[in-house]
Amino acid sequence: MELISKKSSISKLTLGGIMVTLGVVYGDIGTSPLYVMKSVLYGNGGIQTVSEDFILGTLSLVFWTLTILTSIKYVFITLRADNNGEGGIFSLFTLVRSRSRWLIIPAMIGGSALLADGMLTPAVTVTSAVEGLKLLPVFHELFGDNQGNIIALVIFIICILFFIQHIGTDSIGKLFGPIMFLWFCSLAFFGVINLAQNPSLLRALSPHYAINTLFSPDNKLGFFILGSIFLCSTGAEALYSDLGHVGRKNIYFTWPFVKICLLLNYFGQGAWILSSKSNPVFALTEDINPFYQMIPHGMLVYGILISTLAAIIASQALISGSFTLVSEAIKLNLFPRLHTIYPSPSKGQLYIPAINRILWIVCIGIVFYFQSSEKMESAYGLAITVTMLMTTVLLYNYMLKKKTPILLADIMLVFFMSFEISFFIANIVKFFHGGFVAIIIAVSILFIMYLWDRAHVIRVRYEEFVPLDNYLKLLTQLSRDPDVPKYASNLVCLSKCPNSKEIERKILYFLLDKRPKKADIYWFVDVNVTDEPYQAEYTVEKFNTNNIIKIQLKLGFRIDQNLNVFLRQISTELVENGEIEPQSNSYSILPNRKLGDFRFVFIQEILSHDATLSAWDSFVLNTKLFIQKFTASPSNWFGLDTSDVYIERVPMFLGHSNRVILKRVEGKMIKNKK
């Protein structure tokens, strides 16, 4: 009930919900004015080369990109494809995976590209914000034009940002909303005071300026200018991913405000560029950032401070989003189990140390490799276009599943795919300017996801299940055999059998053949991850006995698999309902304890030398088993660190064995020679 009340509260339109939405959802897209127009100038040869038509076309492209990709696709269409209030590419996948097995491919590709983009975002946003310090005379006098000082400060901020993850950001997170509200108001203010000098730029809202610019000689990049324009919508995916954190109503209410503030700032930068392009001072400046240049001189320190805070908040949102994305992938059996910590009472906040370290190392490496925001921007955006394409594919299948008229679904697919493929092609050129970094990261993550999914398919194909009914008598006899020493009062075996009447053969082999394991009650527990994010249910199958119980847990992909807590609740309820008898505890310090000790058994498999799989499948399984050595142990993952846990290692006999069979022959007497 607590989960339901929390989810219903965030779905309501409240002032608190609005502030949380501003602080959580719009960090990435909200900091895009720091580098979009700067990237456009950098790719077109500098401020002195631009014309009024070029600026009008650029602003028109920005407006229609935000309108088509963000407003129409994500806000008005994709947000409706929620999974019990949850959003994101993996939530969308769980809604459509029953249609076809192949849909896991776009889900894995999109998820890995989104994680790769999350590694680039902190480096780009923080560097772009901190570089504003170079405009301050005091900073220039103390440190000169040495970019190394900027890099050192960026590294320091990023290190602090990743360091605080383990203590949680719940308390300071309450400030994110008001700071981002102030940030968006500042964007609008800076834009308006510049746009007021040239309000005629508002005619750029007409789409013909955007189309003309793509074919204009003033546009030196031609079609590939879309690579820079696309940066204005890189945070659009976050609107969908954070749906479960803030609710659809809060996004609907806040997006118009955010979009207006963004557009006012972009148009203000355009007005400043046109008013300053003939200034000889700027003609000699290489790294012009219109965002900082248009800020009134007396407010420059404030502008740098608020933009740095906004960049930090945006980075924090991407880091937290990466933790959530990985957690969902783990529950969907697409990623290794990793140790997860919950540093604050907030349900949505989690911390995965291994992912935090990887993100930190990659971000630091990106800053050192690229050295400046201009070069980072050249690599930024390629990965997220892939995620958008994959989201469109899944969204199309969702519409078909919801019985949307095929013609309407086809129009949606063709319309958005045409735009996103255009942006993808325009971003391809970034591959040779650093975009390969994002692609390498995305491919590495995708390979791990493929390994986990493929290994699961192989195991399911060869897993051997047997009816538990056939062994009830034998297990009951064992539990009462006075000649066999007791192994545990309650022996819990974790199963992966979806059928409530069956069990893996290897578990029975462990219980009966490898030194019989006597217990008062045998518990067989299946953990099934369901498509509903917050489902938490269980079923009980007792086989008309009091000592053999099979539990099937149905847990949503956002629910933590705390087996110890769940089993304690289930066993207590069974005793109170009279379904199992209490166990004597003569030596317990707990007066009301109704059951004896619990011992948990996990069957850990190793690939047998007798397995005859293809070379590729053998490589997949061996690689997965190798990676598992460095991930969370089963006891850690299921919250059994303080419990009695035994891990049994058994060989996996997969495929058809080609063992050599020995043939017995009669031996011949060898006479000793004299």
Image (tube, helix red, strand yellow):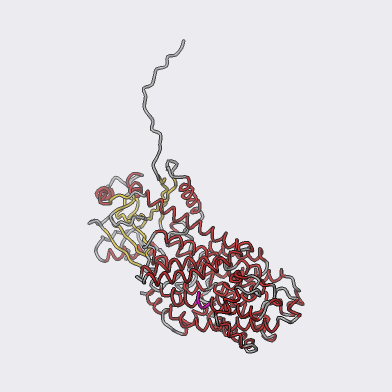
Q: Is residue 203 visible?
A: yes
Tally the marks.
Answer: 0
Seen as rendered, the residue at the extreme bottom is: 196
Write down the quadrant of residue 276 in the picture.
bottom right
Task: Establish if 93 lies above or below 660.
Answer: below
Q: Position of residue 414 (x, y in %)?
A: 46, 69
* Secondary structure mostly seen in the magenta stretch: helix
Q: Which one is nearer the viewer's eye here, 55 or 38?
A: 55
Q: Which one is nearer the viewer's eye here, 665 or 410?
A: 410
Q: Position of residue 325 (x, y in %)?
A: 48, 66
- What residue lies at 49% left-to-right and 62% top-to-bottom? 109
Quadrant containing the N terminus in the rendered view: bottom left
Give yes or no for residue 67 being in the magenta stretch. Answer: yes
Q: Which one is nearer the viewer's eye here, 607 or 108?
A: 108
Region of the chain picked out in magenta, as a range:
66-70
Write down the quadrant of residue 493 in the picture.
bottom left
Seen as rendered, the residue at the extreme top is: 674
Task: Establish if 659 lies above or below 100.
Answer: above
Q: Is residue 91 visible?
A: no
Q: Which one is nearer the viewer's eye here, 428 or 189?
A: 428
Give yes or no for residue 481 being in the magenta stretch. Answer: no
Task: Establish if 447 lies above or below 263.
Answer: above
Q: Position of residue 271 (x, y in %)?
A: 64, 84
Q: Is residue 127 left or right of residue 590?
A: right
Q: Position of residue 566 (x, y in %)?
A: 36, 64
- What residue lies at 42% left-to-right and 41% top-to-bottom? 610
